[in-house]
Image (spheres, grey):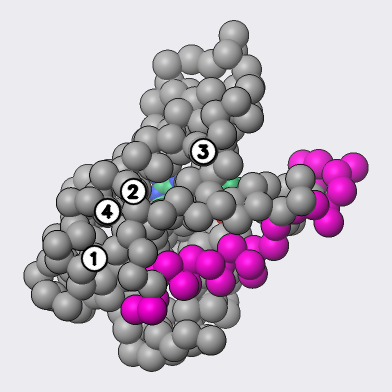
Amino acid sequence: MRTFQDLHVVVTGATGELGGAVAALLLERGARCHLPVRSAAKLDPALARAHVVSGIDLADEAGVTAFYRDLPELWASIHCAGAFAYTPIEAASGADLDKMLAVNARSAFLCAREAARVLRAGAHGGRIVNVVSRQALEPRRGAGLVPYTMSKAAVAALTQALAEELAPERIGVNAVAPSILDTPANRAAMPNADVSKWISLAEVAEVMLFLASPDCTASGTLAQVYGRA
Ligand SMILES: NC(=O)c1ccc[n+]([C@@H]2O[C@H](COP(=O)([O-])OP(=O)(O)OC[C@H]3O[C@@H](n4cnc5c(N)ncnc54)[C@H](OP(=O)(O)O)[C@@H]3O)[C@@H](O)[C@H]2O)c1
C-alpha cells in the first residue's frame, strides 16, 4: 500500500463514480485532496474532509486557471472528469462532437496544462494521471461512439506528448484505459449484462494511485485495465 501522507493531490470528477472512488482512496492513504466540482451538493459526504471548490466548469479556461493558481504546493493532478455518449453517426451533430471534446479532451488539456505549471514551480517533480477508455486504444470498438472515441483518443495523445515534454522535470504523465466499469449507472443502463465481466472501481482507482505515486517512474503509459468483457 502506497502512502500519500500530506501530499497535495487534485482529483477532478469527484462527484462521479471513478473520481469519488479515487478521492476516497487518497484520503484513506493520507493525501490532502483538492476537488474542483460544479456542485458540492452532489459530493459524497465521505469526501467532506477534502478541500472542495464548487462552481468549476472544467471546460472553462479561466475557471480552471483560477482553481490551480490558488492551490498549495502540489504533488499530483488526477483527471477523472468526463462523459460518455452513444451517438450513431447519422444522429451525431457537430454540437455532439464539440461536447465530447470539451468535457473529455479540453478539460483534461486545461487541467494538465495548469498542473504542469504548478508542478514545474515546485521543482520536485510530480504526477499527472488522465483517464482514457478502451476505445481510445482500440478505435474499432468505437462503433456508435465516434465522438466519444475521438475525444478519448485526443486524451491519449495529450498524455503521451506531454509525458515527453515534461520528462526533463521529473513530472510523470500517464493514463488508465478502463474497459466498462462496474458502476450503479452502468448496471441501471444494462440490466441484463453479466457484470462479472466488468472492472471494479476499486481496481481502477488502485492503478491510478500507483500512477500518481512517487513509486511510479514510468511516463507516457496508457495502462489497460480491462475486465473479462
Ligand atoms: N463508466 C465507464 O464505464 C467508463 C469506462 C471507461 C472510461 N470511463 C471514463 O472514466 C471517467 C469517469 O467515469 P465515471 O463513470 O466516473 O463518470 P461519471 O460518474 O459520469 O462522473 C463524471 C464526472 O465528471 C464531471 N464532469 C463532467 N463534465 C464536467 C465539467 N464540464 N466540469 C466539471 N466536471 C465535469 C461530473 O460532474 P457533475 O457531477 O457535475 O456532472 C462527474 O463528477 C470518465 O472520463 C469516463 O469517460 C468510464
**Amino acid bearing label 4:** Ala
Residue occupying image coordinates x 51% and y 38%: 137
**Amino acid bearing label 2:** Thr
The residue pinned by badge 3 equals 137
Q: CA–CA distance between discs 4 and 2?
A: 6 Å
* Residue count near mark 3 (Cα–Cα under 10 Å), binned few <14, some 14–19, many ≥20: some
The residue pinned by badge 4 equals 163
Residue occupying image coordinates x 53% and y 67%: 207
Residue segment shown in magenta? 188-215
Q: Residue furthest right?
A: 192
**Amino acid bearing label 1:** Ile
Residue occupying image coordinates x 60% and y 25%: 140
Please state if 82 lies on the left or on the right of 56 as rendered: right
Asked whether disc 1 touches disc 3, contact meaning CB atoms under 8 Å apart, the reply is: no
Residue occupying image coordinates x 54% and y 77%: 24
Q: CA–CA distance between discs 2 and 1?
A: 12 Å
Q: CA–CA distance between discs 3 and 2?
A: 13 Å
Q: CA–CA distance between discs 4 and 1?
A: 8 Å
Place of residue 157 in the rendered image (x, y in percent of width and height, measured from the top left):
34, 39
Mark 4 secondary-structure assignment: helix
The residue pinned by badge 2 equals 159
Q: Quadrant of residue 217?
A: bottom left
Asked whether disc 3 touches disc 2, contact meaning CB atoms under 8 Å apart, the reply is: no
Please state if 137 lies on the left or on the right of 78 as rendered: right
Place of residue 127 in the rendered image (x, y in percent of width and height, measured from the top left):
31, 67
Sequence-first tag of 4 and 1: 4
* Residue 215 drawn above or below residue 67: below
* Helix, strand or loop for the magenta stretch, by majority: helix
